[in-house]
Amino acid sequence: MKNAEVSRIFGNIATILEILGENSFRIRAYERAAQTIGGLSEDIEEIAQNERLSEIPGIGHDLSGLIKEYLKTDKIKLYDELKKKVPEGLLTLLDIPSVGPKTAKLLYEKFKIKNIPVLEKAIKQGKLKQAFGFKDKTIANIQKGIEIFKKSRAVMTLAGAELLARVFIAPLKKERAVKKIIAAGSLRRCKETVRDIDILAVSSKPAEVMEAFCSLPEVADITAKGATKASVRAKDGTQIDCRVVEQKSFGASLVYFTGSKDFNIKLRGLAIKKGLKINEYGVFRKDKYISGATEEEVFAALGLPFIEPELRENTGEIELACKSKLPRLLQLKDIKGDLHTHSTWTDGDNTIAEMAEAAKSLGYSYIAVTDHSQSLKVAGGLSVAKLKKKKEEIEKLNARLKGIRVLYGTETEIDSQGKLDYEDGVLKEFDIVVAAVHSGFKQSRQQLTGRITSACKNKYVQIIAHPTGRLWGTREAYDIDMDEIFRAARDTNTALEINSFPKRLDLNDANCRRAVERGVKLAVNTDSHSVEQLSAMRYGVGMARRGWVGAASVINTLPLSQLLKAIRK
Ligand code: DGT
Ligand code: CA
């Protein structure tokens, strides 16, 4: 799988062009391509083989050529030439989210800081402040950036892990010796970030499976290889474990390797209380095997109903399972529409009509196209004059389209004072108003919280987008008082969003659970900027399920007529 590599290279090309002071359209084209390819759910090699590269939004003839060159030769000449113009150390410094091209150049050229460890040392020795004259605040930002960078390197996003697991599992599925194969661990529990991939296979010929696994082209090196278990490193450095078990142990192993560790320990304790023993081979009374082929059987042997993988964190689910009171969780098929998407009217890659057709093919009955509002200039936010035209286009489209309704929406900026970007008279016209913070992240807790609660109080705001602003690998959640926001959301009938975009997953699982406990309504949206991204809904649903959220708490599980009534303030 080379999606991540291609995305990284295009991102680096954009950065180098920026340092070299090149044309901003060209820079933006590479940035967009990096983003789109990084977010694809399909393997780019497969797309290239089927001659479908040009169908990827923003990938024209030139970029397709570069992708093909890379897939064929593992190199891009243009990139190699560009790299010669900019020292490597400078690029590594740019990996730190808070360090832009100017600071990187300064650190590198003037102060001879060539990589992150040297930078860390310089900070520690106080050099940055004393010798180089950086402000305390800038230094603190750089330090925080280094932390975020390190953290994001140690784990993958849920979407990244899913894709990597697929690259290993798909070819193994075709092996005759493999009867069943599945990814367990934190990926199966839908955790927002995943450290490594745990694969479980059923086979009566484990040696053949081990051989096939260790010879996969994505394996960079083999860390351990035994009769039924092997560990390898993928080309991106991620550890992948594969274990082979017999059919009669499959359920027990799946329970064990899905975990979490705390869940397993608690389950083992429960088994002991019932005079049983549970391990990865099965459930045993004395030493006699009593069950283990399926997870259902394993739970039943302990007197429990099936516990969904997303719940297995030992945060009260086992106690509820004992009383048969597990919550009914939201499912992807409950979702009737997406209430936060973008089109070519602002920074999306597809037209409203294309977004609507794609939503329809996902089985939705509505889609809100919520383009950016006027003050978000970088994303081409819409003036009031343009809104009129957009509304007309949607009306015409709705008259023509069957089986899907396009809702006229906006993602409106909440400004630094908590004021919305359009007057109430304009907001009133929309079917859906999503309000969002995209600026002033460094304000005080009180100010940031106040901005969001005052947006909740607006009569026309129905959803607060990505409430904590967390962007994995770039920005931590901003400092806000979630309890106050939950209270305001509940009291004003404003839904909070679970943003399914893989780097956001915001609200996260813990916040979802707290929100629902406090009677807050949620909306699971994708924030899609292209038709491909609409399928990210499953990650947001995963977060909801981890947060014990049922369909009744999610407004976009409602049929359209009920939705429009339910969101009225
Ligand atoms: P991560 O860190 O994202 O890889 O998270 P997990 O949950 O996948 O953790 P990992 O890969 O260390 O372990 C895979 C599964 O194996 C885990 O879900 C539960 C199980 N497991 C790991 N260590 C232990 C342990 O010490 N005791 C028990 N009972 N189970 C364990
Ligand atoms: Ca794992």
Image: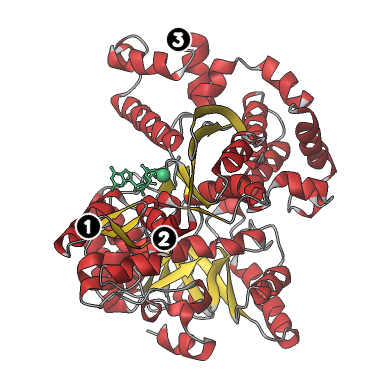
Q: Which residue is rendered at x = 52% and y = 22% of the image?
A: 92
Q: Which residue is rendered at x = 71% and y = 86% of the image?
A: 402
Front residue (pair 440, 182): 182
Q: CA distance from mark 2 to mark 1?
A: 19 Å
Q: Secondary structure at mark 1?
A: loop
Tell me residue 459's x, y (percent).
38, 79
* Tag of residue 251: 2
- Residue 26 visible in the current orientation: yes
Q: Which residue is rendered at x = 67% and y = 47% of the image?
A: 171
Earlier-in-chain disc, 2 versus 1 = 2
Q: CA distance from mark 3 to mark 2?
A: 58 Å
Task: In the rendered view, tell whether residue 91 sits above or below residue 196.
Answer: above
* Tag of residue 286: 1
389 horizontally vs 278: left or right: right
Q: Are marks 2 and 1 in contact (CB under 8 Å)?
A: no
Tell me residue 365's x, y (percent).
60, 82
Task: In the rendered view, tell whether residue 277 sits above or below residue 430.
Answer: above
Crowding at dot 3, Cα within 10 Å, few <14 / some 14-19 / many 20+, comes out as some
Front residue (pair 304, 99): 304
Front residue (pair 347, 420): 347
Task: In the rendered view, tell whether residue 397 sits above or below residue 134.
Answer: below
Q: What coloring was used for the rendering? A: secondary structure
Quarter assignment of residue 522: bottom left
Q: In the rendered image, which residue does mark 3 sit on?
A: 111
